[in-house]
Amino acid sequence: MLAARVATGAVFAGIFVAVLWLDERLAPWYPLWLILSLVLLGASAVEVVNLFAATSAKPSGNTVFGGVIALVVANWAPHVAIGLASRELDGAPIDVDPMFAIHVFAWPMWMFVVIVMLSFIVQSVQFSRPGGGTMATIAGTVLAAAYVGLLGSFTIQMRWLYQPYHGMIPLAALIATSKGADTGAYTIGRILGKTKLWPRLSPNKTVEGAIGGMIAGVLASSIVFAVARFILGAKVFHWDFAIGYGIVVGATAQLGDLMESMIKRDCARKDASDALPGFGGVLDLLDSILFAGPVAYGFWLAFGP
């Protein structure tokens, strides 16, 4: 199980690095990042719908999948608009909004509003009788789209967050810290775990594993920031903020893993699917990143160099 998990993680790490490196030639459009985001979040949307189908909240699969895809595309809209405007001005520099990293979320937020309204409209067309679970379906649809699409938007936007490496350092720090904490908690928990952490949500997770995950998350983030500072010569967090980043993001990543465990436990499922050896489903791979992404993005905005 651990060997399969490490092997699958190594494959995805390689894909991630290759996508970021190849996309550098296509900035600021990043089509490979778009394709990867569409595939991963689209697959996660399908898995969430299948999970929720076992509960009273039976979401509309077409609305959730279409909504998540639309949210992914909406994250590209402001950057494409700026790129097109720059071309119309013959490459002349455009005034940069200092709050752009925050204002950019207006695009996916408007799209989410459309998804909420569309969820009501779709169910009104399909409405047949009182007490038929229409409200539960709307709630499940909105929750599923928000869980995958809205939370995932923060990780997507990191691609444009930081210069001079076009978001590669923030993204690498997020992925390394989240999956480092995830893998560390899993490994240490299996070796030393005795004290149950939150058995009602996940009977296999332990306090010892959580502590090991925190340490692994800090080590992973420290390695990324050390490489960025001493090899790439980039301005990144100083050591105290780097440790703080590892603790905060690593803890949030483990919380995200626990929250997905709650979903699976309520749905009487061990994994979201069997798509990925060692992990389960795509959602099982992304659960920690979905929760940690908004926190990491906020950390960069508040304390980034």
Image (tube, grey):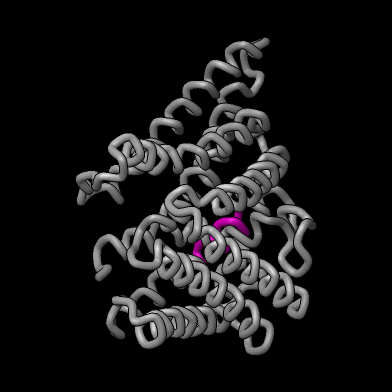
Instruction: Decide if residue 110 is on the left or right side of residue 149.
Output: left
Q: Residue at x 64, y 62 (%)?
A: 285
Is residue 200 shown to the viewer in this render? no
Q: Position of residue 18 (x, y in %)?
A: 60, 66
Provide the major secondary structure of the magenta segment.
helix
Residue at 40% x, 76% y: name it: 247
Residue 3 visible from this viewpoint: yes
Query: Which one is in front, 83 or 258?
Result: 83
Query: In the image, which residues are magenta?
Result: 254-262
Left or right: 250 in relation to 17:
left
Magenta residue check for 257: yes
Please identify the quadrant where the N terminus is shown: bottom right
Q: Which residue: 34% across, 63% down?
A: 162
Q: Nearer the viewer, residue 12 or 165?
A: 165
Up/down of 167 relative to 44, above or below = below
**How many numbered badges does the structure rendering display?**
0
Of residues 257 and 28, the one drawn nearer to the viewer in this rendering: 28
Q: Residue 303 is drawn in which quadrant?
A: bottom left
Question: Residue 47 magenta-drawn?
Answer: no
Answer with the quarter of the image where residue 68 lies: top right
Residue 103 position in % (x across, y down): 28, 43
In the figure, 277 relative to 82: above or below? below
